[in-house]
Image (tube, rainbow, N blue to C red):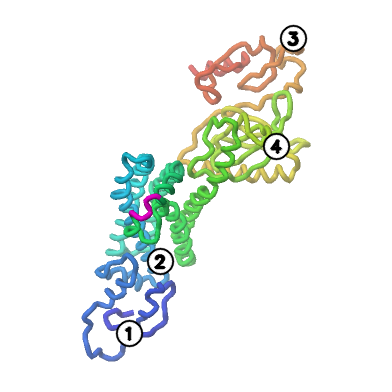
Amino acid sequence: MNWSEGFGEDNIPPNWPKQLKAFCFKKLTDDLPFKFFINPKKIICAQLNNIHTNETHIVDIINSYPSTGILMVDFVSYEREFLKNLTIVLDNVFKTLKDTKYYKIETLLSAPMQAIRNSHMNLLSKIHNLMKNPSDDFLAVFTDSLCSDKKLLQDHTNYMNKFFDVESLVTSYSVEYSNNFREQFGCMTLAQIMRSPIPWQIYAAKFAQQLSGYVANKRPDIAKKLDDFEAQTSKMTDAIDCIPKLEAISRMMIMEPFPIVVGGRRILKQGTAFKHCRSSITQREIFLFSDMFMYAQSNYGKLRAPANYSLTKMRIDILSADKPCIAIYAPKKSFVLQFNSPEELASWEMALKKAIENAKAAVDSQETYREAPIWISDTAADKCMECSKPFNALTRRRHHCRVCGRVLCAECVSKKIIIENIDEKKPEKVCDKCYDLLSKSKK
């Protein structure tokens, strides 16, 4: 294309925006009988949303990158509209909330929204400079600008955590004061604007997916970064969709000793299994989240006595036994779960392995930790595993060493010591051998 020589009918490039269907260009063979009084590039810029007529370098980007240029320009347009709306909320809307019943909206959302705006202004500044002065590897630099900023996505997650705490208030305020901001936001409601950091993630994921599709064959390195970015933003969106499910689980709990509804958390799998306890096997409701595993007792549709285990500090092992059992090892407690069938066991094994792998890959560094032992069942020992004296219900009852898991009498598990992976303050019962080993390791 030679933009200085005019325009007429020509083949429409891929991804050409609808508003530019009438502007197709070709090089004219005859000399022009007149000169243009308006730069054709400015005419094109005038047709693009949120693009100033003086930004003629935008047209050069579209010209240089026919397949991907218009995608990137659309992204810039979306970013500008997104930032404009956030700025109106931060500078105008929040001022009206003070000293009203809606003050909590400003209290919770102002700081995280400001952080989002700062991150997006930084991203847009990088893209502006790149488009004005394109580098030799323009696509790679553009991709790095978008995909390498971990803080941007973290800011979105932080905002989500706060937004859902006041979403009902935001909706009420939006309805009550719907006419106050109609001129500024047009057809969008205030609630939609304040929720806009969430659909931004959907847009960004789709944009990365489309851009990756165009560069995959020639630049697999760029496509890989875009695919990773798309997967990350899609997970954030999935987490939003999971919030009603998390809230439903939270409502089932008689007491909630740890939060269930957490920003970024997804529910991956849910079912039932039989937990091997010290003297019996009892049914548990089990839940696999994106960051933790939880079990609880079910009582008339309610969940009681829940216990949770971080996936970053968890390991599983299939027991070589006749029954479909899986061993779960964690710092505070290790235990055995038994399933109804080998097929059910295989399904949970696959889900747990994948979830643990993903959770550990998401952290920068993996902490070292000591695994708690799986306690030997009371029924497996009729005498003390240390002194060999027989157990009875009155004078010699069964106890467990918290380090080795053996079944012992009170005389052989008489000592206590702090075991950091179980409780950093409360001393736990241990046998003499384990006490000596731990005492030496603490010196």
Earlier-in-chain disc, 4 versus 1 = 1
Q: Which residue is mark 4?
A: 273
Spot occupied by residue 239 in the image (x, y as percentages of width and height): 52, 47
Whether 17 is drawn above or below 177: the answer is below
User: Relative to residue 183, is residue 237 drawn left or right?
Assistant: right
Q: Residue 157, percent across and down?
A: 44, 45
Q: Who's the residue at 71% across and 16% down the image?
A: 398
Quadrant of image for the N terminus? bottom left
Which residue is disc 1 drawn over?
27
- In the image, which disc is placed on residue 358? none
Mark nearest the camera among 2 and 1 is 2
Q: Earlier in the sequence, mark 2 or mark 1?
A: 1
The segment highlighted magenta reads 176-180
Image quadrant where residue 139 sits: bottom left
Q: Is residue 137 visible in the rendered structure shown here? A: no
Cα separation between marks 4 and 1? 72 Å
Would you say residue 405 sits in the magenta stretch? Answer: no
- Within 10 Å of disc 3 (Cα), the crowding (few <14, some 14-19, many 20+) is few
Query: Dot 4 surroundings within 10 Å: few (below 14), some, or many (20 or more)?
Result: many
Residue 95 appears in the rendering: yes
Q: Main secondary structure of the magenta part?
A: loop
Asked if the residue under mark 1 is in contact with the one under mark 4, i.e. CB atoms within 8 Å, the reply is no
Label 3 belongs to which residue?
394
Q: Residues within 10 Å of mark 2 (few under 14, many from 20)?
A: many
Image spot of residue 89 (x, y percent): 33, 50
Give the Cα distance between marks 3 and 2.
Answer: 78 Å
Instruction: Specify the amino acid type for callout 1.
Output: Lys
Distance between mark 2 and mark 1 Cα atoms: 24 Å
Identify the residue position indicated by label 2 in the image: 71
Q: Amino acid at mark 4?
A: Ala
